[in-house]
Amino acid sequence: MPRRGSSRVATLGVRDRLQLYMEQLAELGRRRLFQEGIDFNFAIKYEAPSGTLLTLDQPDEDSLRAYLVSLRPFILNDEAVHLYSVYRLCWRHVRSSELRWRLASWRTKWKQVDKTAGGLRVVIDDEELISAEVFDVWVNAIFHVDVEKRQRLAAMDGIDAMLFRQVFGNFIVRSTIQIIELSWIVEDALRDDLVEESAPG
């Protein structure tokens, strides 16, 4: 993901970053798709006499873009609320062995999401689609004038385009689940005073 905001992150203390994480989750929670549910469903059906029918049910584009505005900070590498960096911050500073066990479990699940969005393995033209990379292509095509990535999307059609979009959607759904699950650990750390204050993240 694009790098930004690293100087600001360096000045924040441990608790400040964890509280900021919870604030960003609250912003995400106000989005309509969070409240109503996000659904991406790809289906292949055979119906005579028309033959094979491909369908992809997904959120409307305006709602999805609004949701991505609040989701992106959790995915962008140098944001203060970047998921994996918040995980590492918690790992370094929590005192509870029980929280460390939960963090280790969270990390295992996140590594699966980052690669295959919870188990969806898609290969197009001998290239396995990596969920985080697919998300990067879509986000840069939507929010930035990235000609190469826009051309890559425009060149796809039919089942390839639908599968690429499905991987993108799965990553959004599964990463949202991971954001929420990490927030439960962050909440417990903040509430039970289990975070060491001695050093910034």
Image (spheres, rainbow, N blue to C red):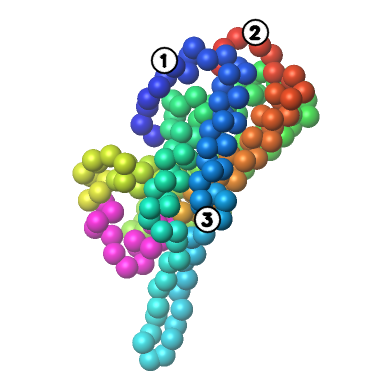
Q: Which residue is mark 3?
A: 38
What is the magenta range?
A: 152-167
Q: Is the Cβ of the residue at disc 3 closer than 8 Å to that at disc 2?
A: no
Q: Is residue 40 visible?
A: yes
**Dominant SS in magenta:** helix
Q: Residue at x 65, y 40 (%)?
A: 181
Q: Is residue 157 magenta?
A: yes
Q: Does residue 83 lie above or below 137 as drawn?
A: above
Residue corresponding to mark 2: 198
Residue 36 position within the rendered picture, expressed as x and y whole percent measured from the top left? 56, 55
Kindly identify the residue that appears in the image at 42 percent across and 46 percent down.
Answer: 66
* Circles 3 and 1: CB atoms closer than 8 Å: no
Q: Earlier in the sequence, mark 2 or mark 1?
A: 1
Viewer-nearest of discs 3 and 1: 3
User: As rendered, which of 108 and 19 lies closer to the eye?
Assistant: 19
Question: Which SS class for mark 2?
Answer: loop
Q: Position of residue 13 (x, y in %)?
A: 57, 14
The disc, 3 or 2, on the residue closer to the chain's N-terminal end is 3
Circle 2 crowding by C-alpha within 10 Å: few under 14, some 14–19, many from 20: few
**Label 2 amino acid?**
Ser
